[in-house]
Image: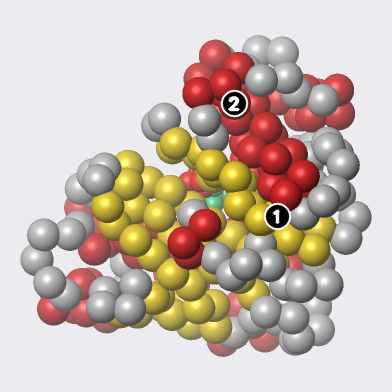
Amino acid sequence: MRDLLPPTVAVAVAGPTDWAGELLAAEAAGLGERAVLSRRQDFTAGRSCARRAMAALGLPAAPVPAAADRSPVWPAGLVGTITHTRGYCAAAVARATDVRSVGMDAERLRELKPGVRRLICRPEEERWCARLPAGVHWPLVLFSAKETVYKVWHPVVGSWLDFQDATVELDPDAGVFTARIAPARVAEATVADPPTVVTGRFVVEDDLVRTAAVLPLR
Ligand SMILES: CC(C)(COP(=O)(O)OP(=O)(O)OC[C@H]1O[C@@H](n2cnc3c(N)ncnc32)[C@H](O)[C@@H]1OP(=O)(O)O)[C@@H](O)C(=O)NCCC(=O)NCCS
């Protein structure tokens, strides 16, 4: 993810020891006692990466508990994001004085089933995907970009955003995506200056799609 985010954002990608690391007490509470092993490993790797990213910013290890809606609660003055998918996990953290919000998402390459694809893609996005170079399942890239958009949007605005609420254009040459948020969702937002456009980066390589975006300061 380092390649997709500006230098003010610290990024850590999980290595072999992160999946079995220790959780801080405040974090373990958010996981719950009945979590299955794979969920425990993913959650642990995310927190381990988050702490390493904080250390890269010169900050002490602080817990990142989970809110009731499962969103991560970053220490005061920080913004951050976590993603995990089969065998891959990363966290990114930045000072709130450097960026307003950060999001990222990773997905293992796969074809989305037609029903899922219809939920994710707007008709115009389907048309754009059909015109992009063959060999990449572009709807999956859109899916990942939209999850990144949600991770950028939700900590700032606090409201739900459906997959149909963002229209995403992909520029495969530049590896850039541009997401336009539905004007109705922007109008409903109760924060000052809600984001209307989220610009991010993406890469498709090996078995993985990765997307990331920051929301600049206002
Ligand atoms: C929250 C969501 C985006 C997570 O994506 P995912 O592909 O399921 O899973 P990932 O591994 O990439 O990300 C999971 C991490 O996201 C973070 N997360 C969860 N809810 C979040 C929220 N509301 N805001 C920001 N981050 C959130 C958590 O850190 C979580 O990891 P953890 O539980 O170990 O702490 C997804 O589950 C979801 O609810 N999507 C629907 C909303 C959406 O994407 N709309 C599209 C708008 S255009």
Residue behind mark 1: 93
Q: Name the residue nearer the viewer: 179 or 92.
A: 92
Percent across and percent down for residue 1 are 49, 54
Q: Name the residue nearer the viewer: 148 or 180.
A: 148
The answer to whether mark 2 and mark 1 are in CB contact below 8 A is: no
Q: Residue at x 75, y 23 (%)?
A: 23
Residue behind mark 2: 18
Q: Residues within 10 Å of mark 1 (few under 14, many from 20)?
A: many
Which quadrant of the structure image shows residue 186? bottom right
Q: Residue at x 73, y 61 (%)?
A: 94
Quadrant location, the C terminus: bottom right
Q: Residue at x 67, y 32 (%)?
A: 48
Left/right placement of residue 85 relative to residue 34 reads left
Mark-to-mark CA distance, 2 and 1: 17 Å
Identify residue type, mark 2: Asp
Percent across and percent down for residue 42 are 55, 29
Q: Name the residue nearer the viewer: 58 or 217.
A: 58
Residue 15 seen in the figure: yes
Which quadrant of the structure image shows residue 151? bottom right
Which secondary structure, mark 1?
strand
Question: Eyeballing the image, is 29 above or below 216?
Answer: above
Which secondary structure, mark 2?
helix
Specify the label residue 68 is tagged with: none
Percent across and percent down for residue 203 are 34, 61
Question: Eyeballing the image, is 49 above or below 195?
Answer: above
